[in-house]
Amino acid sequence: MKRVALALDTARATASRNAKIAAIAEALVASAEGGERDLRTAVRLCIGEPFPPADARTTGVGWRLVAATLEAATGATDLSDVARRLGDLGDAAAEILARREDARPGVTLTEIAELFDALASASSRGRKAQLLTELFARATPREAAYVVKTLLGEVRTGALLGTVLAAIAKAWGADLDLVRRAHAVVADAAETAVLARAGQLQSARIVAGSPVLPMLATPIEASKAPIDWERVVVEDKLDGIRAQLHLAGGHVAIFGRGQGNVAHSFPEIERALAGASDDVVLDGEILAVAQDGGPRPFQALQARLGRTSPEMTLLEDVPVAFVAYDALFVAGASLVEKPWSERRVLLEEIAARLGLRVNPVERVTSEADLDAAYDRARGRGHEGVMLKRVDAPYEAGSRGAAWLKVKRAAATLDVVVTAVEQGHGKRAGVISDYTFAVSSGDALVDVGKAYSGLTDAEIAELGARFEATTIEVNGGYRRVEPLVVLEVAFDGVQRSTRHASGFALRFPRIARIRSDKTAEQIDTIETVERILASQVDSGHREDNAVTKTKTRPKKARKPAPDDRQLGLFGDAATKKED
């Protein structure tokens, strides 16, 4: 474990990708000396995932449990301050543990794997705390740091998945493209490493019941390739969550983009397909649907997300449907190498047999046709359209020109920044998260928060300005004078209790800094209300569904367990998939 921690520290400290790859490759080779289990554990620590994607177990460990256990074990009283300063609880744990002078033997990769298993099977908080206490008593500070990072999903070493795959290739002299292809179908970097070590990458195969990395679409404005109108079809871009449906031996699994099995959240789909004799893997989307079968907006589907056992009233209020748009595997054979046109024929046969809905397609021959198709899709309540090459294979895990998505911002607003926060990850310690408001009479009311859209230079320039105009500081949160005007693009408006305005913008991103405008010239709450009304009229929003999120606390707090997905002090925002 010491070698893995050192390799991750090296990867984190260098900007050189080659140096990252070399350090991780060396650690993987060393870990493999302990056998396949140690190699798998080393890879899981590198990517920050304690279990393989198809494994439904969780450790049940969150920020609060780790923090409470560490404080009890060390007597530290400043953990929250250290975590806020470093932007990471794992690094804070290392700093706190480093204060103690007692020697620690360190932990082995085998012991870490056993810890993950024990945490997943522990039924009480007390037992989990005991296991963590034992870890903190034995692990070196840096070992503890990476175990905590993995438990909380906070591994941010610059050793992203692509770097780890490159390290696997380097470690065993394998072709990187072959490593990537193998990983795309097994969707588990640890298993990919085991195959590479054994020289068996070419044996990687799709298996019904184990997720495949989804093929991704490129925004049409980001694609450099010209459109060959004779070789594309258009289909609606659905407003739901990406889902991969697996049927194997009468069992049903539904994998989301995070590759976890979410079938328990959608029992009506599971029941409808349970016992099916087909062994298939289908790509598609789960939508909330109205009584007539038409699509409801993603806003309605949010109530179903993350529910392990949704109650009957929720199932009745928000029914869902799986809509298929690709076939990846059928009757023991992989289809990913076949062109879309052949996969489509098989998809329609499978869907007819299983009683599934299939996303319809149409041909377009020009930009004008595409615009008309986009307008029709919006009229049906969908986000936009997708362009798909009929001669392209299914490129699992890749984002290329074979799939293009056409999706346009609903509108923009001129807003003023009222509060800022330190970012997290690579922006830890940098003011980069902006809460913004519109005017309501003589007052300002917050309507959203944005993190993206500005360059590093613009963030640095605004950060200095916000520091100079700070009114109040609470931990990493600053209330600032309302002087900086931004133009913000977004995909929609919904009612929400998160902000005092009663509204929240969906997927806001900063379009530009409006240095030419003052706070007196920003948009009004009436404009926001008109945008919502137009979306309700067009069927893209439901005015009676209020997003249930907590109002942002006004003082520093210890993050809840779910905060591990967001950094230490970020507002929660439900995210949907491509």
Image (tube, rainbow, N blue to C red):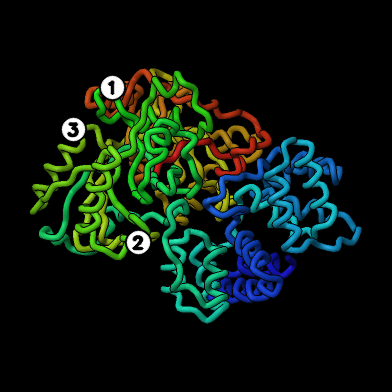
Report the Cα–Cα distance between label 1 and label 3. Answer: 18 Å
Q: Nearer the viewer, mark 1 or mark 2?
A: 2
Q: Nearer the viewer, residue 315 or 13?
A: 315
Q: Amino acid at mark 1?
A: Gln
Q: Is 159 on the left or on the right of 259, as rendered? A: right
Report the Cα–Cα distance between label 1 and label 2. Answer: 36 Å
Report the Cα–Cα distance between label 3 and label 2. Answer: 36 Å
Return the residue at label 3: 379
Return the residue at label 1: 291
How many C-alpha atoms fall within 10 Å of the one at disc 1: few (<14), some, or many (≥20)?
A: few
Q: Amino acid at mark 2?
A: Ser
Return the residue at label 2: 334
Q: Is 367 on the left or on the right of 241, as rendered? A: left
Q: Earlier in the sequence, mark 1 or mark 3?
A: 1
Q: Earlier in the sequence, mark 1 or mark 2?
A: 1
Residue found 77% across the figure and 47% down from its top: 132
Residue 217 percent location from the top left of the image: 31, 54
Q: Amino acid at mark 3?
A: Gly
Disc 1 is placed on an element classified as loop
Q: Is 137 on the left or on the right of 424, as rendered? A: right
Disc 2 is placed on an element classified as strand
Residue 128 percent location from the top left of the image: 75, 42
Q: Are marks 1 and 3 in contact (CB under 8 Å)?
A: no
Residue found 22% across the figure and 26% down from its top: 538
Q: Earlier in the sequence, mark 3 or mark 2?
A: 2
Residue 364 percent location from the top left of the image: 10, 50
Residue 442 percent location from the top left of the image: 41, 19
